[in-house]
């Protein structure tokens, strides 16, 4: 049976009907009516109804950036769409005759990669989504790792520098400040201040008024020494973070998604190099692989649909302590 | 039915017959014939046979410090007893008519706390064993987290200081160098160099030739300002590490075991304080509790027995990808 | 003979007639016409004329926050009064029949302490002015250390944390971000977020809307545990910085001025403690003293006057390479 | 008139008769009778006598690694030759009819560069000697900067990493651990552990048993990617340290001496790049130059001779406070 996946982004809502093999059978898109929870519910309900027409649908899963509670019902906090303590699962269930689950968008994307993409051959996977920020997803022995309060796998907020750069989360020194797309732009601006290696970036900045992530991406593709230097610095930080994550999570594969991962081996090479240089207990256990994500744009909807299907199909033999608590 | 737990330490091997309620019904101890794998096998076999006499025993679990493979059969590396790639499970199974599993000692202790001790009311727990080094155990949704290669939960080797102090694992800046009993002794020696606050420690060091961990522990109990200062510094580092671990693992409770945890609230208070000061996204999800371990000396044998029982009793419906790979 | 000292601050201009023993014989104050270099010149000229009436005056010295060139003629950059490349010495000399020198305000204050205050018994002194930012002054073998381009002794911009907090200077991790009054306020806010120790600060913040440096100062005087904790953290950073400064500058005394130094031993004790704990090559040379400044409010005008007098009275036997270059 | 310079190294003692233009007119070498202060005095006395034969000699200066007191008479601590509180100036003066001064070897080398080498056109120079360790020398307004206790300019012990690598000086995180020849060797070993870039270093290490500084130097000359990577890492640390040193000391030129400086622009380029990237208040004052030393092997004897000559020729109009204290 099919399932529906919905991915609520800051600018658009994407929905798809997804087979149990992860194939997208039908899809819809709609702008996000940001800041209006009620309007978002309307758009999602309408999209699920359209995608369901004439189909056997077992469940629908919704993914959004933010903190979701352990019962996968309430959105504690979703920065893009300005939600606080929104009982989203209940609102949707009231209007749809379908089992509904909600999940964090990085979890959904990670799960899609695990099931149908870069992680499909392993049991334990750690994914870092390197976009504007740094998202995370963890799969352990074939299960998505959610944490005791449903807020785990926030890998972007592991601290890598004591007393380091301030982070939007209120803490300092998070890997998000050293390994995200925003960090790459900052590093590119720093390189642009360095004569010689930074000349092309400096010229572009002068011409356009300011550098953007897109410009830096184009300079990387064009092989500019300054942009590549910034990318290597970014990869170095990510690889050092993976050395710590490897000690804790011990995945068979690290998957890198998000816009910056489009750089492929230009990003993966410095990650691997830094990982090996900072690895604890080197030589005493097999080394993980480092790869880029395969599903890219569809990961959110595919993962949300599949998580919803699994949730609907899992027999409830007994409550976990986390559900009865 | 009962199970047997064996805990192989650097100086002694402890064994116990353990009920399914975690009670120790009978126990034995024996010195560790260190450096001689064959002799250790003999001691363990004999101990299991003695503990089994006249009892219905479902399985035996063995815990040792070191890296165990994902199939829980081979000890890749056990520093205390100088093993490398030792097929320990097979050696024992050949001589005993009993299902045998082996596990890392920190995992065994963590599992005991989860089942019968400080973590018994939650589904997600992170334990740090603060002894000579820093060991770790992670429980997620009622399951022990082992990692893809069986070497996960090595929390002591998460890096907290870039380019920091060299660690025995070959990397630098690991929390083990800032949050272990050995780190506490180093901090106490540093404080002893500071006039005023360090006077009592300096006097003791002069009298005894050198400070030991035991002396520092006694000075903590005695309320010495210098020793308490060192303990607070240690707790500060552990609390900062917990802020990162909370973002990734999101446990409902952090449990602290090992000798240093005997300090109780004197250790927990600075941990909580530092955790709160460095917590990412503070206020957006419930806060974990910080407690000390309850089983202390028995945790290894109780956890090893219980893990063996569960392994023996779990129906094998199908192999996880991690087992077929 | 007397000299005149002028101290141009962000809100007021102070002027004084100063004896060669550092005594203030007469003084004037006037609001700063900020942002208008011409008006400031008018105020300074008028003030010098008033202070000179009926007196034998050998020279006038002017102190301002900012970068001054090596010839002590041009203000490259003065943040408070929005000057850029202002030929201030020439503008004043054109209107006054008096030798004029200009200097950085931290240098002037440091020189005053060296000549008549906390540094009067030594030949080598390092002063840190802990106000909103962190200013510095260095005296070496009885001479003010100015650097090759006149911009030395900017101690506040020594880096203490790689990849640390962003600084107003454009770099990151400067001691100014960890050891200034502004840093103290940030630390107090962080403590206010910690339950227990931070309760009184949190209550005050809730009552007043926001904490100010003045409030934190009052809480320190009142003995509040949270405010004292923040002050000790600040002192810890300053003491660690002094360990590095001691290796380079090797002063006989470290003098602490600025508003935060009013805390006296409450600030000096953690500075000394951290200095000793981080001192390189401990035990192989005499230890410096740590004291607070003595002249406080008058240091700027007294130092500016004295530097001008010395400049006027020093015979010019030959140019230093720095002047002919 | 000529002067004599003596440079006491760990393995040999070098002596030279030096003109007031810094030319070496005659020289001698002799093995160091390490560990025997009396024997060293004999060798130095004999060498000075030989070099003086038939010459008008105004003074003799002796340079040694270690801490020298402010009066330039006593060697507090000289690690190479195992001296403690050795009244070296007095011992020599008792046997020679010549004015004798003693100085730190990095100071002597720095002074030689300032007078006759890479710093001869400026008034303010900072020199870093990048050998096994990191030595420092500071010249300010044409004077050698010695510090209040004679132990200043120990630039190698400025801390660059809080809680960083342990240093031989007893502190942690000193630039000596990140910017010295020994650090370069450590970095090369780390790179040798990285597959791909480190292959050639790894092969060499396997062949020879261990890497040496000399091997790494040869690999740098040969253009090996791994060795060059290590050198760039070293240069990055040195450049970051120079950003802090520039804020404090503001030299017109940074001079790099010692064995590693033979790499020339391969070392200077990453230093300049890192300096610019971490410079406080960039754009508000002229930038220093970065150059390598010119006198190399002769710097010690030339500098020691010249410092002795200046000391002998300087009229003593009055004591500095540092001398009367």
Image (cartoon, coloured by chain):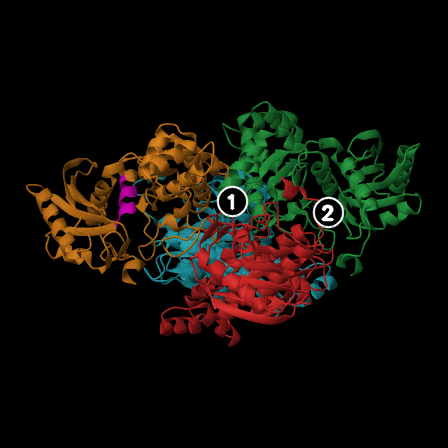
Chain colours: A green, B red, C cyan, D orange
The answer to whether any part of residue C197 appears in the image is yes
Residue with the most extreme top position? A222
- A223 relative to D243 in the view: left or right: right
Residue B166 location (% of width, % of height)? 45, 51
- Front one among C242 and A321: A321
Q: Is residue B278 left or right of residue C65?
A: right
In magenta segment, residue D110: yes
In magenta segment, residue A203: no
From mark 2 to mark 1, how far is it between C-alphas?
A: 36 Å
- Tag 1 residue: A279
* Nearest to the observer: residue A1 or residue A139: A1
Q: Residue furthest bottom?
A: B222
Instruction: Using the rendered image of the protein, determine whether residue C190 is visible from the camera's viewpoint.
Output: no
Above or below C292: residue C105: above
Q: Which residue is farthest left? A: D54
Q: Tell which of A44 and B48 is nearer to you.
A: B48
Quarter assignment of residue D70: bottom left
Q: From what the image shows, is residue A70 above or below residue A133?
A: below
Chain of the residue under the numbered disc 1 shown in the image: A
Q: Position of residue D45 (x, y in %)?
A: 12, 50
Q: Main secondary structure of the magenta part?
A: helix
Residue B248 image position (x, y, % from top left)? 65, 50
Query: In the image, what residue occupies the spot 65% across and 39% down?
Result: A122
The boundaries of the magenta stretch are: D104-112
Q: Which mark is residue B317?
A: 2
Do the CB atoms of the residues marked 2 and 1 lie less than 8 Å apart?
Answer: no
Give the quadrant of the N terminus of chain D.
top left
Element assignment for label 1: loop
Left or right? Give the position of D13 relative to C245: left
């Amino acid at each position: 049976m099919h399932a529906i996946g919905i991915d609520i982004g800051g600018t658009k809502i994407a929905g798809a009907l997804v087979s149990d093999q992860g194939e997208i059978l039908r899809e819809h898109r709609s702008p996000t009516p940001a800041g209006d929870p009620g309007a978002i519910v309307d758009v999602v309900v309408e999209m699920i109804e359209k995608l369901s027409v004439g189909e056997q649908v077992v469940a629908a899963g919704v993914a959004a950036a933010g903190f979701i509670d352990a019962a996968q019902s309430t959105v504690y906090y979703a920065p893009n769409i300005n939600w606080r303590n929104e009982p989203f699962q209940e609102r949707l269930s009231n209007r749809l005759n379908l089992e509904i689950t909600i999940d964090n968008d990085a979890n959904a994307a990670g799960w899609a990669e695990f099931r149908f993409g870069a992680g499909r051959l392993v049991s334990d996977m750690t994914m870092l989504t390197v976009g504007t920020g740094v998202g995370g997803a963890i799969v352990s022995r074939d299960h998505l790792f959610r944490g005791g309060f449903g807020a785990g796998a926030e890998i972007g907020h592991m601290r890598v520098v004591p007393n380091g750069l301030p982070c939007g989360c209120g803490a300092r020194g998070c890997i998000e400040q050293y390994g995200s797309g925003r960090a790459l732009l900052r590093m590119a601006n720093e390189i642009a201040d360095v004569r010689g290696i930074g000349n092309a970036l400096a010229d572009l900045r002068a011409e356009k008024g300011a550098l953007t992530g897109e410009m830096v991406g184009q300079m990387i593709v064009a092989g500019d020494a300054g942009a590549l230097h910034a990318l290597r610095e970014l990869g170095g930080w990510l690889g050092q973070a993976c050395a710590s994550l490897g000690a804790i999570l011990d995945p068979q594969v690290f998957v890198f998604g998000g816009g910056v991962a489009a750089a492929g081996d230009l990003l993966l090479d410095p990650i691997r190099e830094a990982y090996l240089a900072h690895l604890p207990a080197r030589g005493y256990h097999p080394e993980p692989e480092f790869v880029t994500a395969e599903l890219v744009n569809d990961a959110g909807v595919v993962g949300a649909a599949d998580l919803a299907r699994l949730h609907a199909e899992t027999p409830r033999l007994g409550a976990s302590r986390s559900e009865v608590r």
